[in-house]
Amino acid sequence: MNTVRVLLADDQHLVRGALAALLSLEDDIEVVGQVGRGDEVVGAVRRHAPDVVLMDVEMPGIDGLAAAAAVRATCPSTQVLIVTTFGRTGYLRRAMEAGALGFVVKDAPPDALADAVRRVARGERVVDPALAATTLASGPSPLTGRERDVLIAARDGATVADIAGRLFLSEGTVRNYLSAAIAKTGARNRMEALRAADESGWL
């Protein structure tokens, strides 16, 4: 029996500990390392050479989706399994685009999580079935890359002038992108658009 080597990446210490404890109960799975930031993942993969990285989406440094893409680009023999509290359709689509093979939610039963680790290590795709169905039904994100950038820049309540300065755009262009994002999300203002896009996993 080949042992599957796993690296855990989650910014919540208790969650990492619980995942490590659960997976350590499996005879054929070994947790070889743990990190709490997205920008630590690639270095840890190089040090520990895991078969699978079990990764959260929302982490400091860079998020798990960006870290997944970095792992696949630099260490293609390591597979990525996203495990998240947030079963958002946009996250699933972006995770697949980043090269992750698996996407499961944290409230999955322990035996299902261990099975997902084994299957991803074998190169199989594993996706939460309810989330997959919802993602197919909802279609891709309606936002363009620039509309997404402008909404992200508006997160901290920045003014149009602030956003324009950060993104090297004119204020008129920023207003146009914000208007388009508001219309596409069916929102009444930029904060509603931001919330809607966030909840859909488009940002």
Image (cartoon, helix red, strand yellow):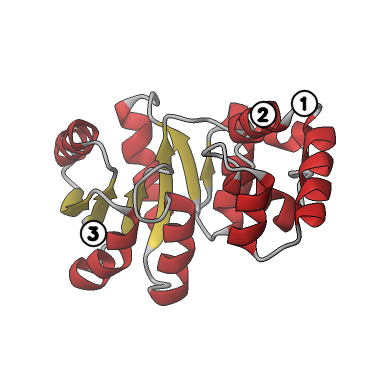
* Location of mark 3 (residue): 2
Amino acid on which the number 3 mark rests in the picture: Asn
Disc 2 element = helix
Q: Residues within 10 Å of mark 2 (few under 14, many from 20)?
A: some
Give percent across and percent down for residue 169. 72, 63
In the depicted view, which residue is nearer to us: 25 or 33? Answer: 33
Q: Residues within 10 Å of mark 3 (few under 14, many from 20)?
A: few
Amino acid on which the number 2 mark rests in the picture: Ala
Give percent across and percent down for residue 24. 15, 40
**How far, Cα to Cα, is label 2 from label 1?**
8 Å
Disc 1 element = loop
Q: Are marks 2 and 1 in contact (CB under 8 Å)?
A: yes
Does the rendering let one see residue 122? no
In the depicted view, which residue is nearer to us: 22 or 57? Answer: 57
* Location of mark 1 (residue): 187
- Total number of numbered discs in the rendering: 3
